[in-house]
Amino acid sequence: MGLLLAVLPMLGAAEEFNAGLDTFPIGIWNYAPLSVFDEAKVQEWQDAGLTLVMGPEYAATPTNIVLMKEVLNWAEKRSIKVIVCDPRTRATQPLPEDFAKGVQEAAKDFAAYPAVFGFHILDEPDTDMFPHVCQAAQMVKAAAPQWHPFVNLLPWYSGVDTRVGFGDWQAYLDTFLKDSGAEFLCYDCYAQMNPGQGGWPMYFKNLNEYREAAQRNGVPFWTTILSVGHFHYRCPSEDDLRWQLNTSVAYGAQGILYFFFYMREPHDNYRLSPIDEFWERTDTFEWMSRTNRLFLKRFGRLFLDLRFEKAMQWPEPVEGCLPFQADDILREVRTDGNRALIVSRFVDKDSRPWVVMVNNSTEESTHATLVLEGADTKVHTVNWDAREQPADVQRGEDCVNVSHWLAPGQMEVYRVEP
């Protein structure tokens, strides 16, 4: 608990950032051209359970700006925020002399549109682009202080230091936040869908690395997970999508993006995107929609209002992860067949403890039991209507057991009164 207490005083900025969101941000990378967008396309965002979407890229012509404003109006009707991908805010090397002027024009163009979340600066900057991205983010924030510059960073992987110019990943993230003034961290990692390229150890290492940097700097972190098979990455199933979303949240992520939604060109070996190359919905669309809407219906913005304490894995942790250890609330974990489980601790604004458990399998269901200290301990769960209700428990002489069947990647959440 020492580390947690050390970072709590710095969390004001994160709380202020999250207070500006109506619900948990779940979004997409968008590679469809602006010209194809009408209100039906924006309705697809809502149907997919999306709450914060990256807008299409476009040339900043008067016609395109008018259409982008229409997209923002359609998004606002559906309570969806949009990251605007305007070329005038995109970082280049070097930044043009009139970059600040272009940013101010973009900010003026969209000032009256509540659906704007922020402007996209750049994706995965390398060492050459790093100073220009940081400068661009600062200039965008200065021109539009009500919005958030968006930069998506690379994941950590073996050898990435030569690409970003930092041998110490935490120093890299700290420097990015300091030099850019970014109000949150965001990155992408797909190794979880390809055991041959880092697999789960790389996936969980990135969750831990970004969360630690976010805690230390008092900002939230988001992660981009995979929804499209490509290269050596397999096509995610519904169980995979549920597992990626819930494990990310259990490790403290406070925003999720999917790579990606509309089929991009060239197609290469990209396959089964939620909207395919014929502009038709695939099984992935239905899986994504169900996963997102189930999460949002039960938990809404709950995880924006909780502070992460720790995440543990049982019975054997993935390399680099914390093993389960009993504490002042948690005594023991049990699953049938010793199937893997993630158990996380959070605390709310009233300093009340919350416990999260996630089935850490993409293939097998399990019956999981948490053994909580104290025969008089009260346990509350979150029901289908996003309301707290007493959990079904079994009471022992000095403990309480709470059990639940969990599908692959399924999450259950409990508020505990010791």
Image (cartoon, rainbow, N blue to C red):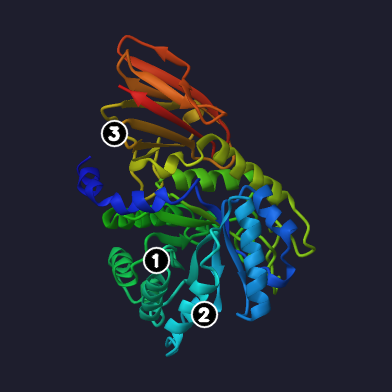
Of the numbered discs 1 and 3, the one sitting upstream in the chain is 1
What residue is shown with label 3? 351
Tell me, yes or no, if residue 320 can be seen here: no
Q: Is residue 332 left or right of residue 287?
A: left
> Which residue lies at the image location 44% right of the left edge and 75% below the top edge?
125
Verify CB contact (< 8 Å) between mark 1 and mark 2.
no
- Please name the residue shown 65% across and 46% down the image: 289
Mark 1 = which residue?
A: 145
| Residue farthest top in this picture | 397
Of residues 342 and 90, the one nearer the viewer is 90
Out of 408 and 59, give the one closest to the viewer: 59
Q: Which amino acid does the dot numbered 2 rest on?
A: Arg
Say if 163 sits above or below 148 in the image: below
Calculate the distance from the C-alpha at mark 1 to the C-alpha at mark 2.
16 Å
Q: Quadrant of residue 35?
A: bottom right
Mark with earlier residue (2, 3): 2
Say which element carries label 2: helix
In the picture, measured across the screen, residue 309 lies left or right of residue 411, that is: left
Residue to which mark 2 is pinned: 88
Tell me the tag on residue 240: none
Under tag 1, what secondary structure? loop
Crowding near the residue tagged with mark 1, few <14, some 14–19, many ≥20 C-alpha atoms within 10 Å: few
Q: Nearer the viewer, mark 1 or mark 2?
A: 1
Indicate the amino acid at tag 1. Answer: Pro
* Residue 249 at x, y percent in the picture: 45, 45
| Above/below status of 162 relative to 227 | below
Count every numbered label the image shows and give the total: 3
Residue lying at 43% horizontally and 23% vertically, measured from the top left: 380
Give me the C-alpha separation between circle 1 and circle 3. Answer: 31 Å
Question: Quarter holding the C terminus?
Answer: top left
